[in-house]
Amino acid sequence: MRLILVVVFFLQIINSAKAQSPLTFSEVESRSYKLYSEQKWDSLIDYLRAANKAGINYYYLQARLGAALYEKKKYRSAAFAFQKALNYNSADSYAKNSLYYSLLNSTNTTASRYLSGKSESIRKETDTLGYNKMGFIYAEGGVKFCNKKEPLGNINYFNLGLRHSLGRSITLYHAFSFLGQYKHYQQIKQSNYYLGAWIQLGVNWKLCPSVHLFWINKSQQTEIPISPPRPLARASKSNEQAFSLVLQRSFRVFDLGAMASYNNFDGIKAGQFGGYLTLYPFGSNVFSATTTAVYHTRKMAAYQTVFKETINFKLLKYLWLTGEYAYGNEQVQLQSEATFPANNSLDPNNYRYSILLTSPISKSVSLYGFYQHEDKDENATNVSYTFNSIIFGLKIKL
């Protein structure tokens, strides 16, 4: 019995030593090929990542890792594995094609189009399938309900947008929108034009400049009435602008962005500077969480801080949910796309939260509904009030 125990003890030591011995190239190649052939994707991912941490890295390791991640629908992580494979063999057509479809399926369509412009074989194949078309129409409308109809009022809103490509590296988004508000003492009609661009500087680099133009017509009384509304006595027009710039770098499980904007609403020059971090913890776009920090100014002084927390995830098979909560003395709300009302009021937001539900009803059409609550303070009358926005929209792929 003692002899058996001694033998078992030494066998355990030997097995432990083997388990802790460094992996070799031949071992990794043999075992990873076997797991790949047997399509044991989970085991293959774990094994190849362990080998990579042990300092073993070569073309077939990254190509097999990318293939396993792709089969597990971790398209974002798969894209970075195929990029690493191309570092070892930049001319390999399998890695290039797999990278393209990984980017496409992770909804990074601007990057996939950029890649198709760099490869004639990808371009010919995907153009035939129609994957590189980037035309969308957006139509949406709704109402911002105010809880203080006197002296404030509701806002009616409508937006029509067009997204299209300009070459293989640039995508443009145009939006025309209208907001109309009738206050106790003032009637406001605001027309907007927004032009935004996504410029792909590389597979993982993106530059997004935009310009937002506002034409505002106001009809108001010379004094704010205390009694029921008086006839409108004075009209005024103003043209206002906002400009923004975003630079984004993508990594395997997160995006990092820096942004800046400038506006001159109501003749008051103001700037916003900040950044954001978007995490993709599962290596795909089925769940993401974004933290944004923005410093904004009034008269280019008196910095205020705004924080935003956003989550986006696949709620059901055909239903996506995006939720956002922003807190801080936010005075100007600028969207990266001009969808949903742009808040160019200088009345500060104490906080706001929103929920967006999106559902595809066919390959070409998606429906979405948007709800937003804003808690605000009006500067002119020192009245605290809230806005509750309800908007419905339609997205059509051309």
Image (cartoon, grey):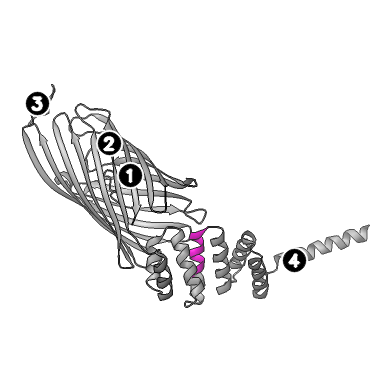
Q: Residue at position x 20%, y 26% from top?
A: 150
Measured in 3D between alpha carbons, the distance from the residue under mark 3 to the one under mark 4, in whole angstroms, is 91 Å
Under tag 4, what secondary structure? helix
User: Which quadrant of the figure contains the N terminus?
Assistant: bottom right
Q: Position of residue 315 (x, y in %)?
A: 48, 44
In the image, which residues are magenta? Answer: 73-83
Measured in 3D between alpha carbons, the distance from the residue under mark 3 to the one under mark 1, in whole angstroms, is 36 Å
Q: Earlier in the sequence, mark 2 or mark 3?
A: 2
Q: Are marks 2 and 4 in contact (CB under 8 Å)?
A: no
Q: What's the amino acid at mark 2?
A: Val
- Read off the residue under disc 1: 393
Q: What's the amino acid at mark 1?
A: Gly
Measured in 3D between alpha carbons, the distance from the residue under mark 2 to the one under mark 3, in whole angstroms, is 25 Å
Q: Nearer the viewer, mark 4 or mark 1?
A: 1
Measured in 3D between alpha carbons, the distance from the residue under mark 4 to the one under mark 1, in whole angstroms, is 62 Å
Under tag 1, what secondary structure? strand
Please identify the quarter of the rendering in which residue 224 is found. top left
Q: Nearer the viewer, mark 2 or mark 3?
A: 2
Is residue 75 part of the magenta span, yes or no? yes
Under tag 3, what secondary structure? loop
Q: Nearer the viewer, mark 2 or mark 1?
A: 1
Q: Earlier in the sequence, mark 2 or mark 1?
A: 2
Is residue 26 part of the magenta span, yes or no? no
Q: What's the amino acid at mark 4?
A: Ala
Q: Residues within 10 Å of mark 2 (few under 14, many from 20)?
A: some
